[in-house]
Image (tube, helix red, strand yellow):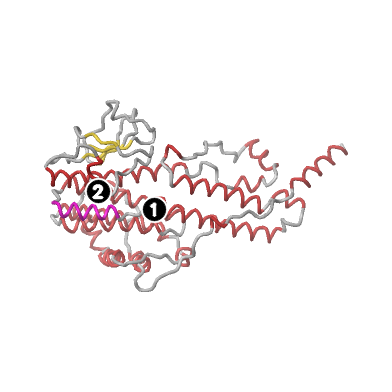
Amino acid sequence: MTVLSLCAVGWIVINSRDIDPPDTSDLVSAPIEASGDENAYTLFLEAFKLFQWPKDDRKVEAMLPGKKWDEAYVDDLISRNAETLALLKQGLACPAYEPHDEPESSDPRPLWQRNDMSKLMALKAAHDVRTGHAGVAREDCYGLLRFGSLVEANPTSLIDCVVGMVVIGRGLKAVGGLLCELALDEAELVSLSDRLSQTAPLEQGWVKAIKMEYGLISGGIDKAAESTGAKHRVISGYIFQPNRTKADFACFCRTMIKNFSRPYSEMDLPAPEPNPSEGPQKLLLLLRPNGMVKLGMPRPDYLNGFLAGRCRTQSHLDGLRLVVACRLYEMRHGRLPETLDALVPELLGTVPRDPFDGKPFRYSRADAAVYSVGKDLRDSWFLGERAADALLSERTSKKTDDLAYFIHAKTE
């Protein structure tokens, strides 16, 4: 028993030693410097204070795809939010968007209100199309894209990136609706092409947010180390090792940052792990050095779904850019291009790469469609498994993940 006790004590002593402080200079995020009157964020905060939104917005969710449209309900909702929409429009015209930290930390509601605000903007765009105000509807859609891009590219947290990506996706669906429902002339298509090109690369904001998250958690680790005295006591040192914790989290952050700039096929995606929150796995983890901390760390596969979502939204963005470019080419030359390379340099700087496999977007001239191979990385269209006839179509077949974008609307 004495030998076992000595071995146990020796094991604890040896494994209570922390590592040297890791070099995490690459994860330092630039401080946010707020602008003055020309800062869109300030106006957005004012808009959020006046924002009136139903607690249960399922009726709005049903109307956004064009179902169960209730003109009186929409008129009332837009009317009650007239001041909010005016402030939002004013903010979108500002040259800068630089968030302040303090209002976000004291009141989390604006984080989620951005998503609800984007629903109002999308609803107004649909309303303007229905009432014959096509020019206003286009500006509504452009504003929705810019709103999402500003939020995603200038985050104060990962939640901002999630919301921003959702808003951009909603804006792209609204733009797809315009292309289906309106016969845009050449000048209008050129303007739309410019607006789509101005949408920020979707990995930009995520990298900023991950660095911010590392800074926040690193600061929390330092405070915990000071309060527990983990650097000086053997038992507490075995339970909590600040430098090792920072190194583990830094490794996680670096992996995510690398992945956000890669096509899906080249991402280093950690395999999903069982959640050890219950049962013997949890006990075994707690008994390991720094085990309690590891139990609270993000799981390696924590952001896998967001990485795939980023690729999907990027595919929607680039697919629409190609649809617009192909329409312009057809207007100018009287025919669709033989290949997507024919769009360069007249209409595009380069053919966009498929965010899933990194190869140039696919194109079927015979079907007047461009498409991405999707998450399964399988060119199902080439194999004869065609998508549904829609302008902005995500295939619903269980056999394929291809994302198809049709150049000609069904109504044409």
Taking the spot 71% from the left edge, 55% from the top edge, the residue there is 230
Residue 196 belongs to magenta span = yes
Q: Determine whether, in the image, residue 131 is placed left or right of residue 63.
A: left
Taking the spot 35% from the left edge, 73% from the top edge, the residue there is 37
Disc 1 secondary structure class: helix
Relative to 380, say whether 410 is above or below: below
Can see residue 306? no
The residue range painted magenta reads 185-197
Taking the spot 69% from the left edge, 42% from the top edge, the residue there is 288
Q: Which mark is residue 163?
A: 1
Instruction: List the residue tagged with mark 2.
Output: 345
Q: Magenta residues: mostly which secondary structure?
A: helix
Q: Residue furthest top?
A: 383
Taking the spot 38% from the left edge, 43% from the top edge, the residue there is 311
Would you call the spot at circle 2 few (<14 residues within 10 Å), some (14-19), or many (20 or more)? few
State the image quarter where residue 307 is shown.
top left
Disc 2 secondary structure class: loop
Q: Determine whether, in the image, residue 374 is placed left or right of residue 302.
A: left
Q: Amino acid at mark 2?
A: Pro
Q: Residue furthest right?
A: 2
Q: Which mark is residue 206?
A: none
Residue 62 image offset from top left, x and y in percent:
27, 46
